[in-house]
Amino acid sequence: MKEVIIKVPEEKYKFFMELVHSLGFDSVRSELGDSDEEVVENLKNGFQELKEIKAGKVKGTPVEDFLNEL
């Protein structure tokens, strides 16, 4: 199976997705990654967590443990 990435204008997105689904492509993913808003929110949460760790409110995870989880 091949994979195709297509950028669709916002105003035509709904029509395009309906067309793709009507053709029987069931494994269509609507988004490949986080939106800009999700990235910004994740960064804000990360910085908030960092502040809490520095303030001693939350215990951080040692780098070795974090890397071993990957």
Image: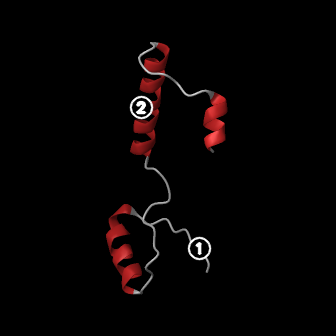
- Residue 41, x across and y down, in percent: 40, 37
- The residue located at (64%, 29%) in the rendering is 63
How has the structure been colored for display?
secondary structure
Label whose residue precedes the other's in the sequence (1 or 2): 1
- Residue 68, x across and y down, in percent: 66, 40
- Residue 6, x across and y down, in percent: 51, 69
Image quadrant occupied by the C terminus:
top right
Q: Is residue 21 above or below residue 11?
A: below
- Amino acid under label 1? Glu
- The residue located at (57%, 72%) in the rendering is 4
Which circle marks residue 16 in the picture?
A: none
Gap in angstroms between the C-alphas marked 1 and 2: 33 Å
Is 33 on the left or on the right of 65, as rendered? left
Q: Is residue 65 above or below residue 13?
A: above
- The residue located at (37%, 74%) in the rendering is 17
Q: Which residue is mark 1?
A: 3
How crowded is the residue under tag 1: few (<14 C-alpha within 10 Å), some, or many (20+)? few
